Amino acid sequence: MGPVIRRLDDQLVNRIAAGEVVERPASVVKELVENALDAGARRIRVELEEGGKTRIRVLDDGMGVPADQLPLVFERHATSKIHRPEDLDAITSLGFRGEALPSIGAVARVRFRSRPRGTAEGAVITWEGGRFQALAPAGGPEGTEVEVRDLFFNTPARLRFLKTTATERRRAVAVVTEMALAYPEVAFELWVEGRESLRTSGDGDPREAVAAVFGRERARRLIELEADGAGITLSGFLGPPDMARRDRSGQHLFINRRWVHSSPLGAAVERGYEGLLMTRQYPVFILHVGLDPAEVDVNVHPAKTEVRLRRERELFGLVVRAVRERLAGANLGRRLVRVEWEGEAGAGQGLDGGRPDRASLYETGRLFPGEVRDVAPAVGATEGWRRAAPGPEVAAAAGVDEVALPATLAVPEPGGEREAGAAGAGKELPPDETQAFRRLLRTCRVLGQLGRTYLVAEADDGLWLIDQHAAHERILFDRLRRAGSEPPVQQPLLVPIPLELGPERFELFWESREELAQLGFGLEPFGRHSLRVTALPVHLAGLADGGRLEAAVDELLELWQREGRRQPDRVLALLACKAAVKAGDALTQEQMDRLLQDLAATDVPFTCPHGRPTALSHPWSDLERRFGRRG
Ligand code: ADP
Ligand code: MG
């Protein structure tokens, strides 16, 4: 007997389709909000419980669905949005496939209540696991309310595939955030586990929506972009180079108001920033591309997060040029500096997107204080770093990616200079060597500070240079690690420091509140997605200095976003780095002596927590040889 071919029943078909359309709570949120927008809603309220796993509720004031049409809502390929084949060639609505609700209805318990505008009464229909349950008259306000409970209750394999509640929650929050950015004329409200997480005014001003999402302070620093050509309009906001992140989480791209995940157009924006960012930095931007719907094919993927563009290359060029020109014309403020230097290794010039003080250049290991000839604000230049650089072997020896170091300091003489941390990143040397180094730190005489970056010390065996930042980082890191098992010691702040995070970043930060409190941070929620820091861990009091806390939080969020939250040592290293004395900070004799004593008391005094050496030595023998005193 041959195989038996049968037509699948609707229930099974819908469950299969649900695999493509409904991947996770965030996809349900996306479909429901898109339906609300397609219905012309001016107000949309979204509620999430357990990150949307147990309950998602979306309320809108859109046109609604008449009672007699309600059964069709859950019918496969039933839609009010397209009717004729030609409609597919120029889609103006967000939905059109008529498969979202049947798919959701196949894998959850759904209650869909609607009352068309201007009618006296509405109706409610319920579906569970792909089966119709009931249809009944219902009161309630005009518009539509959809409640989705127990997603994947009947598909245990899918349920197991979901990530943690925290991760699912963040993804769902991100969806609403994107929608709010795309539709500034719609008032969005997002409630997460009973907390209000986002609220936009819906007044139609894109800047308002951006401020509601990014926080007013960040939004103020964005550079507005408007451009058009060849029937294409571009509008949006570009983050200044110093707002760049280490991942693409700050990039928001919309094509005809549809949020698209990945597109060559995102790469085009990045191209427009070329020369303004360091490697592995990604710009923050919100870009709306508007084009004739006939030029966009949205029918590429069931979840509709990818689109195909007819004139992609032309568009790519337009975006690159528009971004580049806009940035060139923008006053990027004192944030972008032009640097010229000259050292024994050669001369060069470049742009730095860091803080305008010289220290930021030294911190990155790119320059030594002695060799900077000029630092000046740079406006609109698009150059990167140009240098007569020593080769990569020097960079490797100095433990940095990129250098322009004077040869005398950076190039190890064969058999001469040696690193205290020669054993490598964070590895401990044999105990006797550690002991010897500790004794050296305790007994050496600090002669002074070199370039406000290195402590110069005389020891029994010769000259030592100690990197003040690396040493302090190690000290703070060790203290934080040791404090981990004790009750935290807090330093209250007289003036709390506000942190504007935005909905998605707030969720990520809030997930770690207990660990942060354990370290000694005092945190208070403030507004929808902002915090007030009321106290710092006593060892991290240095973070209270202008901007350091904000920078630390930015980097923490990037770390967690990139690699998850289980990185306790990386977190401590990062906090230690941000709170530590910087290259460029002047130190008193007393502070320098203290630093060496404290370094001696650490577990691994040779390296900073990132594995870079804290100290370099020039033994007497080396000096004697180089001065020709000995052969
Ligand atoms: P599609 O959006 O592709 O048409 P859906 O399955 O998402 O398919 O929705 C099916 C139909 O249900 C829509 O075409 C629309 O007519 C109706 N509908 C769904 N949600 C709403 C809503 N919030 N307000 C008004 N009508 C809605
Ligand atoms: Mg839809």
Image (cartoon, rainbow, N blue to C red):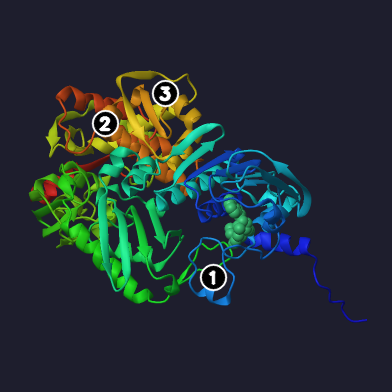
Report the number of numbered marks.
3
Who is closer to the viewer here, 617 or 90?
90
Residue underneath mark 1 = 300
For ligand 1, which image quadrant applies? bottom right
Residue underneath mark 3 = 520
Q: What percent of the width, then of the height, locates residue 113? A: 66, 45
Instruction: Find out whether the residues at labels 3 and 1 contact each other: C-beta distance under 8 Å.
Output: no
Distance from disc 3 to disc 1, alpha carbons, whole Å, reads 50 Å
Q: For marks 3 and 1, give the one nearer the viewer.
A: 1
Task: Name the kind of residue labelled 1 in the image.
Answer: Val
Q: Give the residue furthest to the right.
A: 1
Who is closer to the viewer here, 385 or 242?
242
Task: Name the kind of residue labelled 3 in the image.
Answer: Gly
Point 21% across, 57% down: residue: 327
Residue underneath mark 2 = 440
Query: Is residue 529 shown to the viewer in this render?
Result: yes
Point 60% across, 42% down: residue: 57
Q: What percent of the width, then of the height, locates residue 125? A: 72, 48
Task: Name the kind of residue labelled 2 in the image.
Answer: Leu
Q: Quadrant of the N terminus?
A: bottom right
Distance from disc 2 to disc 3, alpha carbons, whole Å, reads 33 Å
Look at the picture and state if 434 lies above or below 290: above
Q: Residues within 10 Å of mark 3 (few under 14, many from 20)?
A: many
